[in-house]
Structures are given as C-alpha cells and as structure tokens.
Amino acid sequence: MRGRIVAFWEGGYAECPLPNRGEITIGRSRLCALSIQHTTVSRKHVRLRLDDPPVLIDCGSSNGTKVAGVVIEPGAECTVFAGQIIELGDVVIAIQPGAPSRAESALELPRIDELV
C-alpha cells in the first residue's frame, strides 16, 4: 500500500508514509511509526495491518477507538478504507491513498460513448 496516514488534533498534526505491506503502530510512544503527542492517545493505541483493504486493531487503548463513529472494542479488528474517519481519543486520523502505480494508470477505461 502506498499513501500516508495523517492525524489532526487541536494544536497539532502528524503524518507518516505507509509502506507497501506489513504493519505499523500508531500511538503516543516515539517508537510508533506514527507518533501522536496527545494525552488522549495511548502509548501503543492501534496497529494498522496493510492488507487489501487495511485492518485496524485496537491495542487495548485507554480512551478508545472509533471507525466511522463506531466504537472498536479493545483487541478487535476492523476493516478501514481510505478517507474514512478514525478517532483515537480526541485525535482524528485518516488514510490518504497514494498515486496509482504505472501499471494501474496504464489501464484505460472505455469512453462513455463507446459504451452506448
């Protein structure tokens, strides 16, 4: 997966590029791939497994995790999509997709007049 993950909160923001595959951790610890310096975020709040589509796993956070407004129970997994709002305590994060690969952009879609 390419792209990045961005986090916003009152008075700050953070971002990190996403690797093509694997898993990243998100939390307050400086050891996390996306380190969010906000008191409502746990040291290791969530993990993001970069499957297709990505999967978010709550790591037993103190202030909870929501995906599209739905509470994710500690230890539970939830599929997430680019642009979907994810809340870690009082912090909002979202996945931003990257540019398509050359192979993907080489695919041509038919024009609408060719379809009718």
Image: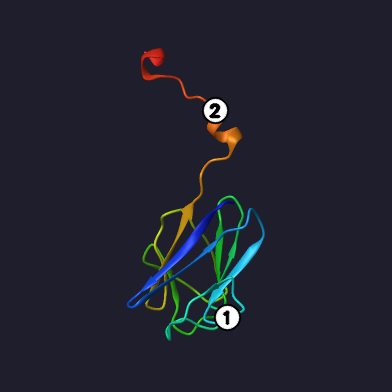
Q: Which of 7 and 80 is in front in this view?
A: 7
Question: How much space separates mark 2 and mark 1, taking CA atoms?
Answer: 41 Å
Q: Can residue 74 be seen in this view?
A: yes
Q: Residue at x 53, y 41 (%)?
A: 100
* Image location (x, y in percent) of residue 58: 54, 73
Q: Residue at x 36, y 14 (%)?
A: 113
Q: Can residue 81 be seen in this view?
A: no
User: Which label belongs to residue 107?
Assistant: 2
Q: Residue at x 56, y 35 (%)?
A: 104
List the residue tagged with mark 1.
Answer: 30
Above or below for 115 versus 26: above
Helix, strand or loop at mark 1: loop
Q: Nearer the viewer, residue 109 or 57?
A: 109
Q: Relative to residue 16, is residue 115 drawn left or right?
A: left
Above or below for 115 versus 93: above
Residue type, numbered disc 2? Leu
Q: Which of 6 and 54 is in front in this view?
A: 6
Quarter of the image for residue 111 reads top left
Residue type, numbered disc 1? Arg
Q: Earlier in the sequence, mark 2 or mark 1?
A: 1
* Image location (x, y in percent) of residue 45: 53, 77
The C terminus, quarter of image? top left
Helix, strand or loop at mark 2: loop
Q: Relative to residue 105, is residue 92 drawn left or right?
A: left
Q: Relative to residue 74, is residue 71 drawn left or right?
A: left
Q: Relative to residue 108, is residue 90 drawn left or right?
A: left
* Image location (x, y in percent) of residue 51: 61, 54
Q: Residue at x 62, y 79 (%)?
A: 31
